[in-house]
Each structure stands twice: as C-alpha cells, then as structure tokens.
Image (cartoon, rainbow, N blue to C red):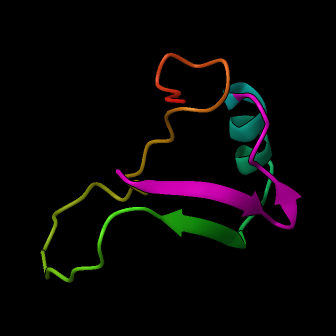
Amino acid sequence: LYDIILRVNNIDFTNIKHQTAADILRASGKKVQLLIRRLAPLYSEEIELKHSGKLGIYIKGGIGNEYFMK
C-alpha cells in the first residue's frame, strides 16, 4: 500500500505512465529486479494465505492514472 516502485530491471519508473509501467512489468520475464521505496514504518506480521496459484498482486497508480497522488 505504501510502496513506490522506483526501478524495474534498471529502468527508471519515477516519471512513466501507468500503462507503460504495466507493459514493462509484463514483458520482464521470469526474473524481475525491483527497487522499492517504502513509506510506511517497518513491521512484520505472519499470515497464511490459501491461493489459486496466481501471484496475488495488483499494480495501481502511476502518472496519468486515477490513483496517482501528488
């Protein structure tokens, strides 16, 4: 919720549009190197999830997107 993607596979994500970011992530292959900025305080919580085999993450936001906050 409070993480910001700064770089993906050495590509600067700080000023790209949401669709461009999503396209780069989709095309990145099996290995992805992320540089993330964490805004929230660190905490640890152990949870157990049952899943259907999907990754379980959604990417929202980015410049030109309704979720982008200045």
Q: Is 11 left or right of 48, judged from the image as shown?
A: right
Q: Position of residue 59 (x, y in %)?
A: 51, 41
Magenta stretch in the rendered image:
1-17
Magenta highlight on residue 14 = yes
Q: Residue at x 12, y 75 (%)?
A: 47
Q: Residue at x 53, y 27 (%)?
A: 68
Please identify the quarter of the rendering in which residue 49 is found.
bottom left
Please identify the quarter of the rendering in which residue 5 is found.
bottom right
Q: Position of residue 46 (x, y in %)?
A: 14, 82
Magenta highlight on residue 12 = yes
Q: Reply above or below: 26 against 53.
A: above
The quadrant in which the C terminus is found is top right
Q: Position of residue 60 (x, y in %)?
A: 49, 34
Q: Residue at x 79, y 45 (%)?
A: 24
Farthest right residue? 11
Q: Reply above or below: 18 against 21.
A: above
Farthest front residue? 70
Q: Residue at x 55, y 65 (%)?
A: 37
Q: Reply above or below: 4 against 10.
A: above
Q: Position of residue 3 (x, y in %)?
A: 46, 58
Q: Is 47 left or right of 16, judged from the image as shown?
A: left
Viewer-proximal residue among 30 and 37: 37
All told, the count of numbered labels is 0
